Image (cartoon, rainbow, N blue to C red):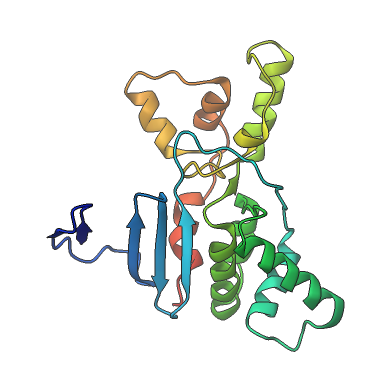
Amino acid sequence: MVITRTDGQTVHENIGPTAGYDPIRESVFVPRSSSLRIELASATTVTMQIGTVLTTVERPVVYLDQNHWIDLARFCIGSAQISGRRARVCRRVTELADAGKIILPVSGAHLVEIAKKADRQRREVAEVMAKYSRGWQMISPLRARAHELLHLFDAEPAGLGKSQAFTLDPHALWADDSARQRSSARGHQGSGVERLGRDGVSTPGRTIYPAVLSTG
């Protein structure tokens, strides 16, 4: 690990390899922009927004169905399986995403679906998802529905806003957010949505994340 300070000096620390992250060759965190640049073993570079507590959704959100992510991946690798109008749409979507004019969130359903694919297609689509989502996620539908029900019965003061439904919060796309569980163990009760996430249906999220980019 190398830390570059604002005065130009650097600090070096050997932290050793991290199990389960073989596809990642190098990662660079930039505090000023709160972003993480990741270079994969395939030579693909993706930039993830880490965000801050002040980060809000101020751009149009475009939710792509799984078949559209597959089309986007085919376009990005120059596949002959996509051409004409679909290719033009994919080009425009990538241009808008690269320019930061739209948000392309991923969901738990996306990762569950792509995890079932063969190695090459899984890697190609997962890399495109990582590149163009830039860390944005749609929260678990279980959390969204729980919030709606709690709001209906006046247990939540307000409905779910766009910045709550689409977020940079870690693990937000899974119903069993382990980070929220740890928070609860320290005495934090959390909202009704958090309680449903702790007590609701468990998902295989924590095992799918490292598997999605695996080439083996």
**Residue 11, relative to residue 83: is it above or below?**
above
Q: Residue furthest bottom?
A: 80
Please tell me in which quadrant of the rendered image residue 155 appears.
Answer: top right
Please tell me in which quadrant of the rendered image residue 71 appears.
Answer: bottom right
Task: Give the x, y percent position of residue 198.
Answer: 49, 30
Task: Give the x, y percent position of residue 196.
Answer: 56, 27
Q: Residue furthest front?
A: 7
State which quarter of the image contains the N terminus.
bottom left
Task: Give the x, y percent position of residue 120.
Answer: 56, 80
Closer to the camera in the image, 109 or 49: 49
Say which residue appears at 60% left-offset and 33% top-offset: 164
Say which residue appears at 49% left-offset and 41% top-offset: 169
Q: Is residue 160 found left or right of 30 in the rendered image?
A: right
Say which residue appears at 59% left-offset and 63% top-offset: 132
Task: Give the x, y percent position of residue 170.
Answer: 46, 44
**Residue 201, relative to residue 46: is it above or below?**
above
Q: Is residue 4 found left or right of 38 in the rendered image?
A: left
